[in-house]
Image (tube, coloured by chain):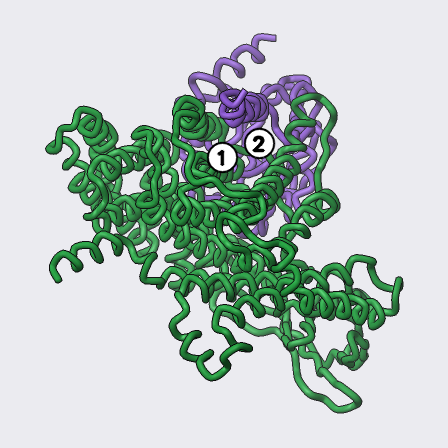
Chain colours: A purple, B green
Amino acid sequence: MRRALFLLPVAIFGIMALLFVKGLTMDPKTIPSVLIDRPVPEMALAALPGRGETSGLATNDLKGRVSLVNIYGSWCIACVQEHPYLLEYKKTGLVAIHGIDWRDDPALGAAWLKKHGDPYERVGVDPAPGRAAVDFGVTGAPESFIVDKAGIIRYKHIGPISPEVWTKTLLPIIRELDKK
Amino acid sequence: MIAEIGHFALVLALCVALVQAVVPLMGANRGWASWMAVAGPASSLQFLFIAVAFGALTNAYVTSDFSVMNVAQNSHTEKPMLYKVAGVWGNHEGSLLLWITILALFGFAVTLFGRNLPPGLKSRALSVQAMISVGFLAFILLTSNPFARLEPPPMDGNGLNPMLQDPGLAFHPPMLYLGYVGFSMAFSFAIAALLEGRVDAAWARWVRPWTLAAWIFLTGGIILGSWWAYYTLGWGGWWYWDPVENASFMPWLAGTALLHSAVVVEKRDALKSWTILLAIVAFGFSLLGTFLVRSGVLTSVHAFATDPARGVFVLLLLCLAVGGSFTLYAMRAPAMKMGGLFSPISREGALLLNNVLMATGAATVLLGTLYPLIADALNLGKVSVGPPFFNAVFLPLMAPMVVVMAVGPMMAWKRGDLAGVLGRLKFAAAIALGGAMLVWFLQGGSAGPWWTGIGFALALWLGLGTLLDLAERIRLFQAPGEALGRAARLPRSSWGMVLAHLGVAVFIVGLTASSAWTTERIQSQKIGETVTVGGFGITLTGVHEVPGPNYTASRASFDISKDGSVIDVMQPEKRTYRMPPRPTTTAAIRSGLLGDLYVVIGDADPKGGYVTRLYFNPCIPWLWAGGALLVIGGLISLGDRRHRIGAPAQAATRRVAA
């Protein structure tokens, strides 16, 4: 009996550990707005200054072709990191790359593209509080969404795109969706 | 280049830690002195390497080297130097580096001060310490490298969260970590004792000062955090039972219990296996806190950017460290020799009761903290457990503890005289009762909450009981002439106890009054308009833009008047930081013995006024004073001759020499 008492701590801890294992597989915030397999939310974002009045991003612009919607901002450090790759992938012509300048001063967003290069066909501005991006289920920048020809979100990548992510994950999905 | 040196130093530290984890332990088991002797130089070398790594990261922050990703994500050239340095630990990777630096520092301290420790105990403990090091160094190197480079480097960094750009918070994490990691000392020595199968007074004499030091830092860290929350968050509160606050409070409770039970081990050679268990639990709670903050299993305002891989890694560490030690405990502790017997009515008995209540308190906090996770895991839906639960369950457990706190120190060891002690305390009981009735009368009976009387009675009982105990020890009433001399000769640990217990009494006053009688006015206030709060007239006289080093502030001016004449001007600010662009509030606080006038300025409203929040928070300074008394009591006690590290052995040598 006395021995059993000494086993109590490890037993209690064992139960806690099981709970934590389960806990790690769940997300306490469970942001339900990860709109995978749902249509792109209704939006009509204004164009970035200096890119032409009609170069904004609206829901209908994302239909007809497989497209990649990239969330960026001039304040975002990791965006600098992924940007050269986007420029490279633009050249391949495999996918239409669009941008959303999120929680940003549009003038700064435009200057940033001038400085780092502009891989986007269309860019919509979504200044603070960034309502359109929230509808998209954005949790931070950079973040990229793959949208199929029917305008349905098929994949979400959180964080900067690296060549590894591109070849292993994004490109196969894009190719697959392109066939349909 | 310097970043690479830092990275490389971490790898070297890992190699040294691996050697230190294995060689001295094997040496201790086989009785090979030369293998045991590896522990000393290894712990020094490990500390050196980790210090180099910490220095390298600090250098990257101070020089704003944005090619280091960690610096780019958390710093900014415009930031004042204090926050550049504080930025080192204001993020996941850097704070882990601080954690491990402190761990290595403690290991080094064992080598430095532990010359008189039995070699077997010392080398085993240092091996255990190194095992913890191995786990955390691997964690840093595999999942959270603070020295990762960024290509191409950005022109400027993302900046530190403005909320963290505050002197109170710059020192809050290092203090907390000194506390958390300080408990690793008691932990390592507890595991070493289990491996040796022996706990004695010498063990307790070594563990006590270190536990006390860790406890002082943890107490200071928690109080500093509460104070920061109070003046920056702008809602007049100071404790929210947030999971991360609880994560610091649970080790504090376990550590406080450990502090008291270690006394019993040292003085009476009893409660040994319980003390060992507490040592494991205190550090286990520290590790649990690390897991909760960094894994993302619970939502909290404090959570670091989370990553499932990190969560798995910390969970693994937690299971190895805590699961492993509890298993060792189950195997070895039953065989440990029982020490001196005591009757339930004795100082030991009172300390044990205090321990049981503390442990139960920690368990309820644990349950409340984990309950959202339990409910989620069992598909009972998403719940959040807030202050009502904790206040309803935790506080009633603490009330009997406070009652015992006044009785315990007056009790004799081994067999006490409860009736006699209570007889000596009847004066305190009468005043406490009278005080409760007075408080009840002053708040207008049931116009205030029912528990204010209880709170004040407990505070008076504890405060007077502690002072009576002190008076008896120095024979103030029997021989007043000699009292001063006796007071000077009283051991510092007794003074420490008296001050710390008085601190609790003072804290209870602040807690009770501030929770019961806060007045709050939230309104749109036009320039020139006066609002009355807590007997003060508060007039908004203007709002101006003021530039700061890396922010602009709207600073409001309020004239504070009492009985028609202006006595003070208060200037709260609402700051907008440039990088990252985020607003923060800085409350203006006018502290007095009776309470704080607390003024917050909000946004301008379309009708030409400003949203202002005005509070009168009674007795808030008593909370900080109580916390300060706890820390001062701890420090004085730490200065006790008997607590000086290695002192007993030195005294013995001196005697031989004489």
In x, y percent, where is residue B427?
68, 69
In the rendered image, the quadrant that contains the N terminus of chain B is: top left
Have a look at marks 2 and 1 and say if they share a chain.
yes
Label 2, on which residue? B297
Q: What chain does badge 1 belong to? A: B
Label 1, on which residue? B291
Of all residues, the one furthest to the bottom in this rendering is B565
The residue positioned 73% from the left and 42% from the top of the image is B389
Of all residues, the one furthest to the top in this rendering is A179
The reply to whether residue A99 is visible in this rendering is: yes
Q: Amino acid at mark 2?
A: Val
Q: Is residue B323 above or below residue B543?
A: above
Name the image quarter holding residue B297.
top right
Specify whether B339 is left or right of A50: left
Q: Are marks 2 and 1 in contact (CB under 8 Å)?
A: yes
Q: Amino acid at mark 1?
A: Phe
Q: Count the marks: how many?
A: 2
Q: Is residue B412 above or below residue B443?
A: above
In x, y percent, where is residue B24?
20, 31
Provide the secondary structure element on which disc 2 rests: loop
In x, y percent, where is residue B279?
43, 39
How far is mark 2 from mark 1, CA to CA? Answer: 9 Å
The residue positioned 40% from the left and 47% from the top of the image is B72
